[in-house]
Amino acid sequence: MAIPAPSAAEVGVAPARRWSPLPVFFGRRRAPVLVIAIAVALAAFMAVPLFYVFYRGLTGSSEVWDRLIDDRLPDLFVSTLKLAICVSLVTVVVGVGLAWLIVRTDLPGRGVFVWLAAMPLSVPPYVGALVYIAILGPNGYVEEWLSALTGTRERDLPMPEYYSLGGTTLALSLFTYPYVYLMASAALRSFNPTLEEASAASGRRMLSTFWSVVLPLLRPAIGAGVLLVALYVLSDFGTVSLMRYDTFSRAIYDQFTSRFDRSAASILSTVLVLITIVVLWGQSFSEGRARYYQTIGGWRPPRPVKLGRWRYPALAAVVTVLSLALFIPIGLLVYWTVEGLTDSSVASDVWSYSDDSIYTYAWNSLWTAAAAATLAVLVALPLAFLAVRFDSPFSRWLARLSQAGYALPGVVVGLSLIFLLNNYVEWLYGSAFVVVLAYLLRFYPQAHQSTTAALTQVSPNMEEAARSLGRRPERAFLEVTVPFIRPGLMAGWALVFLTSLKELPATLLLRPAGFDTLPVRIWINSSEGIFTLAAPLALLLVLCSAVPLYFLLRQSRVGPTVIT
């Protein structure tokens, strides 16, 4: 008689478990259900506008698609791409050049320049465009000066066309180069000088060393800065509108507000979002699997490169850039403000305590930006906590989904919210909270990145120690982790506040009747050519923007780490 084989239980062998994809997707450590539920709800909410724009565009009429493809899309694509490429190239040259001269050389006064070179970020590009229209545009100061000098009528002077690709590139480049400068200067401060010394020992000259050693290691930092610049150019509305240069964002706004063609605006928005996603993917693909490491052994603060006879020409170049990007714009705004104060009618229009004055505009700008920044930090906490403490494909997917607004320019965010609210939440449309919501959707990724970076530096063992002493998980997080990540939370708050303060297209589309902010009034007065009314508003906006920017520079320790 055959003896049956013993079972696995009888010999003490555990039966083989079935493989399940769930631990792979959700991670081995399971997050609290409440945290998962909150994170899923927030991520879905943040991604709704992106999916809605795609839905509206892809379900648009084929006739409208054909008309736009024949009439507008090719020209808009070419003009937008040309502008993005030109501005990116100029900002790379200016940003990297300034970073190297200020951080790595014996340039006179570099301890001051390290701060000043970043300050143009507090000047909105549409304010800079306003200044240079008055200087270089038709009947501008330069044209008047040349006419008086030569005795030639202004219209007969052979002046270059300022309302062009070149003029728009200048207006955008001068006030976006700090993105590249900040990234490149941070990378240069952590650069190991032994690599340059080895290159010099092998017989390479300074310029050759810069191109073959320094620049390749700066590639990730430059790429990150250029990505920010390109995304800003794609989303810009105020500058291109004042410069009368056609891009997708300007065309979308015109289709919606002037021609009242929502279908065409949705289709153009879809194409613009696709271009933005391609730019994001292209930047990620360009890096590929490449890694850029430096050896730590033997690291020391690098010695400043001696400029020799090029010291003062380099100083002149730095002062020229800062004059064009900071001193001239601020100086002209101050001049216009003082000029307006001497005119009693202008002064009463600007400084009166009415509902239509600078105080009202400033208050509307400040409280909406502060509300958006506060909401962004509160939303970032559960999403960043899930992504860092319970890392898995699921948590990473949620984090990316919640940052979908990064691919939506301001005009597209405004348009998507108009469509959604009109169809589903009519009672909310027409309130100031919609403006705050647009800022949150648009700039939330800044708070998320800052919060995530702060959380990764705090060991989870500290929370576990607090729980072992009887603290509930939520109390352990609030009492132990939050105090350590407070600087990161404050930096994220300041960054969202700064960018929300300057936002123009979403505010233009979504603001309720009679609710104007500083950017809106600046744009309205500038488009009407009333510079003495726009200047005090622009100057106040620059001052309000400089405060959070100064805080961010202090947080990143840009100033004190300059090589002395």
Image (cartoon, rainbow, N blue to C red):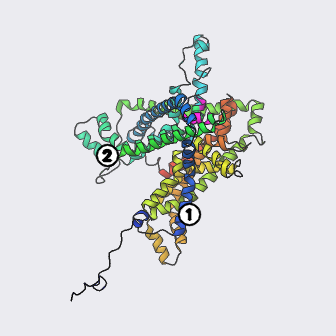
Which circle marks residue 38 in the picture? 1
Residue at the image position 46 percent from the left and 48 percent from the top: 560
Q: CA distance from mark 1 to mark 2?
A: 47 Å
Residue 57 coordinates in the image, percent (x, y)? 56, 42
Is residue 167 among what the camera can see? yes
In this rendering, position of residue 556 left or right of residue 541? left
Left or right: where does residue 8 sit relative to residue 322?
A: left
* Secondary structure at numbered mark 1: helix
Check contact, mark 1 vs mark 2: CB within 8 A: no
Check residue 245 for magenta coloring.
Answer: yes
Amino acid type at image mark 2: Pro
Q: Main secondary structure of the magenta part?
A: helix
Q: What span is colored magenta in the figure? A: 241-254
Question: Can you tell which mark lies on residue 193?
Answer: 2
Q: Would you identify the image quadrant in which residue 225 lies?
A: top left
Q: Residue furthest top?
A: 151
